[in-house]
Amino acid sequence: MTVDDPTRASSAPLLTGRGLTRTYRLPRPSPFQPGAVRHALIDADLDVAAGESVALIGESGSGKSTLVKLLLALDAPTAGSVTFDGRPVRPGRAAALRWFRRDTGVVLQDPYSSLDPRMRIRDTVAEPLRALSIDGDHRALVDEMLGRVGLTREHGDGYPHELSGGQRQRVAVARAVVHRPRLLVGDEPMSALDVTVRAQILALLRELRDDLGLSLLTVSHDIGLVQHLADRVAVLHDGRIVEQGAVDDVLRNPRHDYTRGLMASVPTLD
Ligand SMILES: Nc1ncnc2c1ncn2[C@@H]1O[C@H](COP(=O)(O)OP(=O)(O)OP(=O)(O)O)[C@@H](O)[C@H]1O
Ligand SMILES: [Mg+2]
């Protein structure tokens, strides 16, 4: 199957979010006044089908990371629910969520802060295998994944400070998929990278998607990346999903002001 296969999006949802809402109570300005309520996310519905690639876009503070954290059970919603493969997903004890952690992988925004500087690359990549009690030869699994992301065994023996930014991001991707999850979630996985490295990581994600059948959920500010990687896109504005649909439909015929402005700032579509 290729990335452009239109039948992919028609399969049953793997991940669903329904009515997801997150409010924060801000600190009291004085002991006599209640803290204000901030609505970080309001009533968001989002699906990711098996094998599908979905992008989340929207300006800073629009609620993208909040939505990702709720979908990954890294934060509890004020209202709403999440399911994966039809099973409810709620933040809780690690043991109760192990099945969900096995099926998901996460790449964070800043590749440097997400790697432990005192750990060899090999051990960093192997960590999910240990933490999730995955069967098999961990060393072989790690070496295979390092190869897939274009790194060598020698890289595996080294430490994060010995790698370039792009190589570190490859390590972050390897660690996120070493246990063969069904869904890979990236919160601006490439914002720290230059254009060339971005293109390499993008190609890598597409390859992993084709080879491992991964579903992808990617937060990005980069319209080019969204066009190349995603089947569908959801646009967030002030905590609400203001439009979502096939990437071509939403980007070529944007209905919401924010999306229109976003597209107007891009020189050409193709
Ligand atoms: N712990 C918190 N306490 C209070 N408000 C918060 C907290 N976390 C997030 N918010 C608020 O929720 C809103 C959404 O934040 P979020 O991090 O989801 O935005 P974002 O779309 O990911 O932005 P960016 O593109 O800058 O990463 C913002 O107004 C933010 O200030
Ligand atoms: Mg964010």
Image: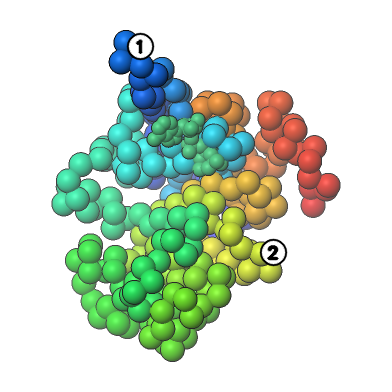
Quarter-wise, where is residue 165 in the image?
A: bottom right
- 91 on left or right of 248: left
Q: Residue at x 66, y 64 (%)?
A: 194
Q: How is the image coloured?
A: rainbow
| Residue 195 image label | 2
Viewer-proximal residue among 73 and 233: 73
Label 1, residues with CA under 10 Å away: few <14, some 14-19, many ≥20? few
Is residue 215 visible in this depiction of the protein? no
Among all residues in the image, which is located at the extreme right? 267
Ligand 1 has an atom within 8 Å of the beta carbon of the residue at disc 2: no
Residue identified by numbered label 1: 33
Q: Residue at x 22, y 53 (%)?
A: 98
Image quarter (top left, top right, bottom left or bottom right) of the N terminus: bottom right
Q: Secondary structure at mark 1?
A: loop
Query: Is 80 drawn above or below residue 247 in the view shown?
Result: above
Q: Callout 2, which amino acid?
A: Val
Is residue 24 visible in this depiction of the protein? yes
Q: Callout 1, which amino acid?
A: Gln
Residue 101 place in picture, x, y as percent = 29, 54
Query: Is 224 drawn above or below residue 63 in the view shown?
Result: below
Residue 201 place in picture, x, y as percent = 58, 66
Residues under numbered marks 2 and 1 in contact, where contact means CB atoms less than 8 Å apart: no
